[in-house]
Amino acid sequence: MDDSAGQLKKFQKELSSGTVSLVLLAVLGQSRQALYGYQIAKRLEELGEAGVLAGKQSALYPVLRNLEANGLLGSEVEPSVSGPPRRYYRITKLGRDVLREWIAAWEATRDSVDKVLQGEWR
């Protein structure tokens, strides 16, 4: 993978793997109701953040399951009138606490990287 396009793709994949959980927690943290996967993907699209999933809606399901396994999300399966049952996700209290910590860590990281990129690192 010597070409710049390949390097960019690799960088985007590495960067995305560290931010998808944060973004999913944030979407669920801002929602007043539980959401199923497609609704979450649509919210990301509406916010202009579909790039976080790199065009692969199916990529969010393993992350949602991982967040749930770690106690950051809860879920319930409900029947659907238009297809198979849907799993609805909601953020837990632990998830809200972790989200606040992750946001602070993200902001500190973003600020540090911005300083380096702008040549202001001291």
Image (tube, rainbow, N blue to C red):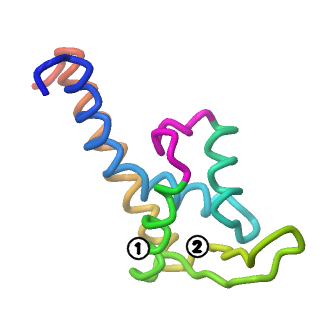
- On the picture, is 63 further left or further right than 39? left
Q: Dot 2 corresponds to which residue?
A: 91
Q: Nearer the viewer, residue 54 or 72?
A: 54
Task: State the residue at coordinates (86%, 68%).
Answer: 82
Extreme right residue here? 81
Q: Quadrant of the C terminus?
A: top left
Residue 11's place in the image compared with 73, above or below, is above
CA neighbours of label 1 inside 10 A, class few (<14), some (14 to 19), many (20+): some
Task: State the residue at coordinates (39%, 80%).
Answer: 70
- The location of residue 45, given as percent across then percent down, is 64, 39
- The location of residue 31, given as percent across then percent down, is 70, 61
Residue 98's place in the image compared with 38, above or below, is below
- The location of residue 55, given as percent across then percent down, is 51, 40
Q: CA distance from mark 2 to mark 1?
A: 13 Å
- On the picture, is 10 further left or further right than 42? left
In this figure, what is the number of numbered marks?
2
The region drawn magenta spans: 48-57
Badge 2 amino acid: Ile
Task: State the residue at coordinates (64%, 56%).
Answer: 40
Q: Dot 1 corresponds to which residue?
A: 66
Q: Nearer the viewer's eye, disc 2 or disc 1?
A: 1
Q: Quadrant of the N terminus?
A: top left
Residue 29 disc label: none
CB within 8 Å, label 2 to label 1:
no
The answer to if 55 sits in the magenta stretch is yes
Q: Nearer the viewer, residue 55 or 115?
A: 55
Asked where in the image residue 116 lies, by quadrant, the reply is: top left
